[in-house]
Image (cartoon, helix red, strand yellow):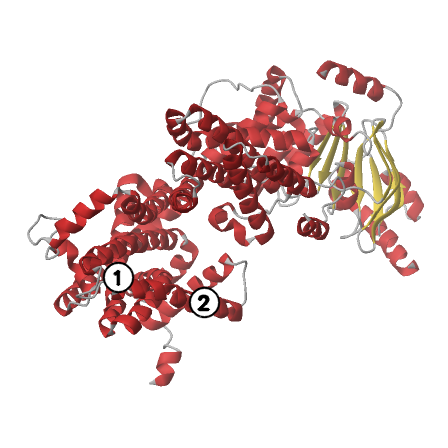
Amino acid sequence: MQDGVEDKFSRQANGDHAALRLGGLTKIFNKPAVNNFNLTVRPGEFYALLGPNGAGKTTTLRMVAGLLPPTSGSIEIFGIDALRNPIEAKRITAWLPDEPMLYDKLDPVEYLEFVAGLWGVEPRRAEANAEELLNVLGLWEHRNERCEGFSRGMKQKVALAGALIHEPKLLMLDEPLTGLDAAIARQVKELLTRRVNGGATIILTTHILEVAERLASRIGIINKGQLIAEGTLDEMRQKSGSKDSSLEDMFLTLTGVMENAA
Amino acid sequence: MNKVWLAPQPGSLGWLVMHDLLLSWRRFRSMFGGMSNRKGVIIVLIAIVVFHALGIPVAQWFVTTEPGGANQRLFMPALASIVLFVMPWLVSQSLTSTTRALYTRNDLDLLLSSPLPPRFILFARALAIGCESIGSVAIFVLPIANTNAFFGGWKWLAVYPALMAAGLFSTAIGIILTLLLFRIAGPRRTRVLSQILATIIGAAFIMTLQGLNIMPEGVREAIVTSIEQPGSGFIYDTQNWLWLPVRAVAGHWDALILWCSIAVITFTATALVLGERFAMSAVHSASAVATPARQTSNKPLRFRKGAGRALRLKEWRLLGRDPWLLSQIMLQVIYTLPVSIVIWRSQGPSGSLAISVAPAVVVIAAQISASLAWLTISSEDAPEFLTTAPVERHEVERRKLEAIAIPLLCFLAAPLLALAWTSMELALYTALFAAGASASTAFLNFWHPMPGRRVAVLRRHSQSKLIAVLEHLMALLWAVAMVLAVVESAISLLLLAIIGAVLWFNRPKPAKPAPLQTTTAIVAA
């Protein structure tokens, strides 16, 4: 059963499917939070989703993670229809929100065992992954301490280890560097870069434009639930018409223009 | 003068006590889902009226214990059992409050860093603990004293000073016990241990009373006779010092004065002498709040396979790491057991013990299961995380249910074995219906999760009255269905059908939850 499933999605993944394809995705709470949102992220891309507060970044990713049913539209992850077949989609996806989803009364090793169990990772492989992640993230010494005593940064790292232990093909991170100190932030950035080089697809939302500028191969700017600009940093520069403007300038121009137009 | 009474001068003893009592009042309100001040006062007033009404039959019974009355010889034993009931209750209350005071450091830190003498601060805190304990018991006890005074004469008002004295005395005991635990078990364990101790002591008062109630007539009679005869022995001698609080309640002036003096002296001495130590302990508890590092093992990582096992293991780990919560559930059992026995003794069909106890087991199973289910939900620190996992919702629920089954079986093993010893057939029926009852209350909790703080386990019902009602309804239906099944009545099937219908109407809707719809569905059911 397990093998069959793996075969199925490796076949799908090896095809020319997009890592993530959103078609006309819409979520209406009282007013539209995400409005006819179209997005295609290619496999192996490091995609940064930028936008002002309340632009719909987190709502979008929560829908992709299966936490929120969309009002309308389609979500496809490596060719799997995430709305029709959520379990298969979740099997290759990881979601890391800005507030780490941890269990206070479990220690990092137990947490990782739990996550690996849920995603059906073969135990020997999970053990090796856990050991590596705990070492890389500097958690090895703390592996038998319960998470309740951890600082925010430590918790974020444990959650990240949990997101990576099942080797997701698509990793979505919501503000992954919020509240982390410089040293930890660098560790995390390095780890993410390494994952992308290893073939994973990463989508992250961030307020910190510098992070997007440095890490992302492609950037999308979202405002009022819609994608208003997309491209590499250079393409964006050309679009905004000034060659040496920073991402911040472009971001402010683009989101400001939209507001004025509306 | 009046002004001083209304608003004590800042920094004075009264002011500090008022501050603490204000916090206690807020805690009380939050127990009922954070109601407003006005609502709180109204609830207290209603409670006072209700307890006065409940006090009337008690008072009428006590009239028969007046000299020359039919139950004259039961006067002292009855008062003694009331004292046995109230004292552990007070100690339990003050243990809980003392522990809270010790570990709610942020406020104690602030007070101790202020330019007020620590001894003074801690005396005020001890006084506040005493007031809180007295208050929580007084609301039940004093109305009875009032009705007794109305029917039986002014001497009953001696209950007022006797209760105050008992409160102060118990607070002193509570403080001493907590600090003793702190000394023996260390700051980290004391928190849990004292809570468990409070639970056990708190349960003791119910157990003593029910113990007496369940005892055969002959034994009770023998005790009463022993108490009647002067010089009949150490515990039974009403002139003995152990009987001092009882004599105080009975309105013997000398005993009352002595009891009050002993209480005030014990309390003052404890608060003043141990105050310093209390402050030190509080400071020490600061360093203990961070979790203990378990010995880092050098063993290689060993993971087990499978989502089901991972889910169960996680539930057990989370449940097992909260011994206090399990003890709270145990307390619930202890509270339910005698009550159910009394109910079924008076209403059981044939009066035989087996028929009367078996339905109680079903009811208890349903309640423990509901508590455990609620615990597994509220201990679910990361429900969103589970939603992102490639596991179906019903699988998560099934594993939670499996995880609950083992501790539940531990709780039920003894009564089930006892039943099996009496009648194998009855034990089988009980096990079957208890399983059904547990599963249905557990599912109700899964389907209508009320995320709440885990510490609120005993007051979880304040969060959703509807689910509480349904839980009790389920428990009752299963119990009655069992009795009917045993006597081979077809109505049993009808009850099972009703249970099925209630569950069906409460099943999770595939789309988003719609609480309003569910409500109407239940009303319709």
Q: Residues within 10 Å of mark 1 (few under 14, many from 20)?
A: many
- Counting from the top left corner in percent of width and height, residue A3 is at 73, 14
Residue at the location (17% across, 46% down)? Answer: B222
- Counting from the top left corner in percent of width and height, residue B387 is at 68, 36
Q: Residues within 10 Å of mark 2 (few under 14, many from 20)?
A: few
Which of the labelled discs sits on residue B44, or is there none?
2
Residue at the location (19% across, 68% down)? Answer: B251
Which of the labelled discs sits on residue B168, or is there none?
1
- Counting from the top left corner in percent of width and height, residue A21 is at 86, 34
- Point out the residue furthest to the left here: B231
Which of the labelled discs sits on residue B412, or is there none?
none
Marks 1/2 same chain: yes
Q: Nearer the viewer, mark 1 or mark 2?
A: 2
Chain of the residue under label 1: B
- Towards the viewer: A88 or B518: B518
Chain of the residue under label 2: B
Q: Secondary structure at mark 1?
A: helix
Q: Is residue A100 above or below residue B302?
A: below
Residue at the location (62% across, 28% down)? Answer: A115
- Towards the viewer: A49 or B422: B422
* Left or right of residue B154: residue B348: right
Q: Quadrant of the N terminus of chain B?
A: bottom left
- Towards the viewer: B72 or B92: B72
- Point out the residue furthest to the bottom here: B1
**Residue B351 appears anywhere in the view:** yes
* Left or right of residue B378: residue A6: right
